[in-house]
Image (spheres, helix red, strand yellow):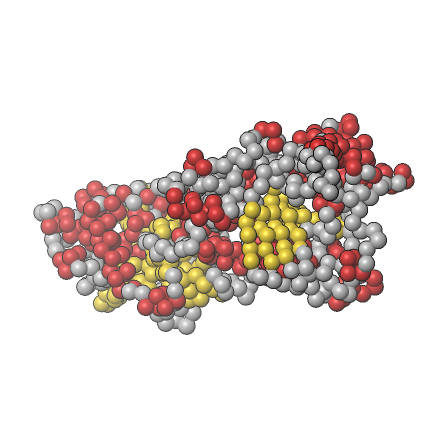
Amino acid sequence: RDPRARIPTMAADADTLRFEPWQSAVDPGFWAELARRKLDNAGLSEDPWLITALYAPAQNAVVSSPCQLDARAFGAGAESQLAARARDVAASGRLEMPGTLVNVNTLERFRAFDRGTLMSNAAKRLVKYIRSGRADDDAALLTPFIALTYADLKKWSFYYWFAFPALKLDVPAKVISRGPLAEHVELGAVADEISRGCEATLRRDAGDPARTWWIVDNASGECEPPSIASVRTRDFSTWTLAFVDPCASEAHPGWALRNVLSWLAVRTRETETAGVTAGAGAAGAPRRVRVLAVRKSAGRVCPRASPVFECVLPVVTDANLENPTGVGWEVNAKGRPGPRLANLGSSMDPARLASQAVDLNLKLMRWRLLPQLRVAEVASTRCLLLGAGTLGCAVARCLLGWGVRGVTFVDGGDVSFSNPVRQSLFEFEDCLGGGKPKAEAAANALRRIFPGVDAEGVRMTIPMPGHPVPDADVAQVLDDVSRLEDLIDAHDCVYLLTDTRESRWLPTLMCAAKGKLLINAALGFDSYLVMRHGGGLRASECRTGETIDECGGGAFAGRLGCYFCNDVVAPGDSMTDRTLDQQCTVTRPGLAPIAGALAVEMMVAATHSRVGDDPTRTPAHTHESFASSRSESTHSDDGTTALGIVPHQIRGGVFDLSQRLFAAPAFDRCVACSDAVVEAFSRRDERDGFLRRAFDDPAYLESATGLAAMKEEVDDAAWLGEDSDGDDF
C-alpha cells in the first residue's frame, strides 16, 4: 500500500458525535395484517404487541437503509414459514429489531397519547438490559423501536408515529476523526481482511447476537464475537468495534451506534467502579474507542464505503442510570416531530376495499355485542336461491349484508316491466328487448353491488307434479332434475322462493333425501310464511313430538315438518286456467323484504347451532317454549344459539302486524319428505320412473305415501259414525 495514503482528518477539538436518525419504511402488507388482527383478535384491547422489524447495512452512497416492516413483522405463520424467513434474513445480511406496537382505538386518543411516559419506560428498559447483562448476550436489545398507531378501518387510513429509543446522557460521545476504512492509517493495511470477516459475520444465523456488532483485531483484521470479558480486559487501542450501519452519510454514523456506545460506557464504568481498569488510561478518564461502520457497495462489505470513527465514549452519571431519559421520536415528511399517515384507501384495488368494508361491520359485532359470531363460517356458506323474483332479490341483498360470498340464482323467467319497482336487483334496462333472463340479470346486479361476491345465474325450469311430461321432453326434464340435484349438492343452504306450490316439491324432496338445510319463504296478500325443515333423520328414527324438556328448554327437537307436511293433498297444477290476478304475485310490497330478511336471519342463526355441526338439527322454539326456558331453565343449553332462537315456522301479517312461531313434527305420510318418497327417489335404478309418474299424476304420490289410504280410512270412519237409526220426524 502507498505509505502516503491519506491520514484521517483530526479534529482540533473533539466534536459531539451526531447520529443519523432511523427512518421507517412500512409495507402495505403490515397495515393489512394489523387490520386483520385488530378486527379478528384484539378488538377493543390496547395491550401492546411484540413485533419485529428488519434493517440492513447501507447499500447506497446517498440513501440510508430504513427500518422495514411487512406482514411478517407479527411473527405469525407456520413453523416452516418462520424458518424460511430466518434463512432469508441471514442470507440477505439483514438484522432484526425488536419492537412494541401500541394500537389505540380512537384518533383523539392517538393525538393525546402520553408519549413521554412511553419513551421514559423504554429508556428504563434499556438501562435494565444493559446493567443486568442481557444486552451482553443479545445485542438486538440495543436497537428497539416503538410504533404508536391508530387504524381507521372505515377509510383504510393508518396514523402512526415511530420511536427509536436511545439513552440521552449528560456528556455525549465525541468524534475525533473520521475516514474510510480503506484509507485508515492503521487499519488500511488489513482492510480487505476486515471486509471479508465482516461479510462472513453478516451471514451468520439470524439469531446470532454477533451479527449486530463485533470486535475486529487491529493487527490481524480478524473478526471476533462480542465479549464483555474482552471489553473489560483488552486494551481499547488493540481492537475496533464494528457494527452494522444503515446510515449512508460519510460524516455521521447511524442511530444504531448510539445505544452501543452507551452500553460500552456503562459496562466500562461498572468495571472501573469495581476497581478494575478497562482498557488503557487512568480510571475515570473518558475512554477512546475506534468504531467501524460496516456498509456495503455492490452487495458486499466495502472498505471504501465503510467509515472509521475515532470516538470518545459518553460519560455516564448516576442520574443517567437512576432516572434515564430517552430520545428518538421520528420526524414526519416535513422534517418536524409528528405522526405520519398511510392512506391505503386511495391506493387499494376498489374491489378489495369493498371486500374489506363488507366484513368490517360484521367483525365489529364481535368486539362488544357478539363475540361468538362466526363471521368466516357465515361468509363461506354457499346459498342456492330457487327463484329470482321479489323474494329472491330480498334474500340476496340480505345475504350480502351478512358477508355471504357465494350465491346462485335459479329461475326460468325473464325480467318484465312490472318487476323493477318491486324486485330490487332489476332496472328498467333489464326489461328492454323482451327482458333479460332473471337469474343472469340478478347475478350481474349482485356483482355490481359487491364485486367480491361469487354470483351465478342458472336459467332452468324446475320440473313439477301435476305437469305431465310429453315423451319428447322426457330427456330434457330428467336432465333438469340432474342439474338441480348437482346445484343442491354444491351448496350449503337452499332457499325456496318460487311462486307456485308444486315448484317447491322436487327441491323439498331432494333436500330431505340429502339432509340439506332448506328454508322456505312464501307470501300471501298481507301475510307471509318463513320456515325450515329438518334433515339427516328419517321420521322413523325419532320420536314424534320429542322435545328437550329434560334440559329445561322445551324446544321441539324432533325432525321438523316440511312445506307439505300439513297438507293431505299432493301438489297439482295451479298455473292453468288462472285469471290475471292469479297469474301475478299480488302482495303488499312490504312483505318481501320482511320475509326475505327473516329467512336469512333464520339461516345465520342456524349456522350458530350448538347441536354439532348440522344446522338442520337445531331445536325449534316457539314464543311459549322460549319464555318457559328463560324463566325455568337452570341449564345453559336451552335450545338457543348465540343469535337467539331458531324457530321452525314464522307466520306473520301486516294487517294486524302480528307474528307467531310454530313448531310441528314431520308427517310420516308427507308427499315430499316421508320415508316412502325419499327412498323411492334415492333408488337410482327406479328414480326416473318414480319422478315421471309423480309429474304426470299427483295422485300417485298420495298412493305411494299411504296418504290416499289414510283419507279413505277417515271417510269410512266418518260414514260409520253417522246416525242411521231412522228419521226424527
Q: Nearer the viewer, residue 576 or 100?
A: 576
Q: Quadrant of residue 566?
A: top right
Q: Position of residue 668 (x, y in %)?
A: 64, 33
Q: Using residue 646 as the reference point, say whether residue 196 is left or right of it.
A: left
The percent coordinates of residue 256 (x first, y second) are 33, 56
| 179 up-or-down from 576: above or below | below
Q: Residue at x 56, y 46 (%)?
A: 662
- At x 70%, y 36%, the residue is 722
- Residue at 39 percent across and 50 percent down: it is 52
**Residue extending furthest toward the right:** 472
Q: Is residue 365 left or right of residue 501?
A: left
Compared across the picture, whether 99 is left or right of 170 comes to right
Quarter holding residue 227: top left
Please identify the quadrant where the C terminus is shown: top right
> Is 186 rendered above or below residue 657?
above
Q: Position of residue 279 (x, y in %)?
A: 18, 49
Say which residue appears at 14% left-offset and 48% top-offset: 271
Where does residue 583 sit, x and y in percent of width and height?
A: 78, 57
Along the viewing direction, whichever of 21 and 34 lies nearer the viewer:
34
Q: Nearer the viewer, residue 423 or 71?
A: 423
Is 368 positioned to the left or the right of 135 in the image?
right
Query: How many numbered discs, if any?
Result: 0
Q: Taking the image as drawn, is residue 493 in sight? A: no
Outermost left residue: 275
Residue 559 in sight: yes
